[in-house]
Amino acid sequence: MIRKLKHGSVELVIGNIVDQRTDAIVNAANTKLAGGGGVDGAIHRAAGPELKELCLQFPADENGRRCETGHVQVTTAGKLAAKFVIHAVGPFYNEKYAEKAHAQLRQLHVHALQAAIDHNCKSIAFPAISTGAYRFPIADAARIAIASVCSFLDANIGIELVRFVLYKQGQYDTFKLALDDWSAK
Ligand code: APR
């Protein structure tokens, strides 16, 4: 499904993030940008070893961190169809610090969209960041991701298409509900 906002559209699809031909795809990365499983593993496998080399060129702090939670780093995309990979570090969900995690997930989506504009991207594809290994409850993650993206597209010119690529039907249904709720406001 696709829904038009003031300055661009939001699309929901079931699929694999690595297959997207958008200008940018967003990776569900970790602070070390050293690769991992899930989305991160799939993107690195499909992009080829060049992607890790590019990631490791970002300076690391004393703990090996190359990107803070809620922030992004941008590389080219190796063998992928996309031009750029926006490596975004979502929060690991802990109920005790839920408000902080909500704010970081919101911030991450805004940073990724801004980075896409800075790299002249007109289209960008997001997976459901933090909802796998980082255990963010899917309904909350969907509500936050949809609200962040829709507010951004209502307020900023530059991105024509934001696609959420959901891995499973249940995740798609949850994102669709969040988008319907947003549109009904
Ligand atoms: N395409 C789209 N969605 C996918 C794909 C794929 N190829 N593979 C997994 N998913 C879905 C999962 O079902 C989940 O809902 O993406 C969502 C995010 O899952 P993760 O990849 O585990 O990302 P996250 O929860 O943000 O955890 C990040 O996991 O792999 C490590 O290095 C990564 O440490 C980081 C952490």
Image (cartoon, rainbow, N blue to C red):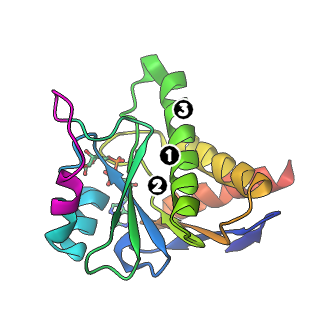
Q: Position of residue 143 (x, y in %)?
A: 63, 45
> In the image shown, does 168 or 106 lie closer to the viewer?
106
Residue 166 seen in render? yes
For the N terminus, which image quadrant?
A: bottom right
Q: Quadrant of ligand 1?
A: bottom left
62 in magenta: yes
Q: Position of residue 30 (x, y in %)?
A: 28, 44
Q: Which residues are magenta?
A: 53-64
**Residue at the spot x=73%, y=68% of the render?**
8
Q: Earlier in the sequence, mark 3 or mark 2?
A: 3
* Residue at image mark 1: 138
**Residue at the spot x=35%, y=74% of the render?**
18
Cα distance between the residues tagged 1 and 3: 12 Å
Is 88 situated left or right of 121 in this image? left
- Predominant SS of the magenta segment: loop
Q: Position of residue 96 (x, y in %)?
A: 44, 16
**Marks 1 and 3: which is nearer the front?**
3
* Residue at image mark 2: 128
Dot 3 crowding, Cα within 10 Å, few <14, some 14–19, many 20+: many
Amino acid residing under circle 2: Ala
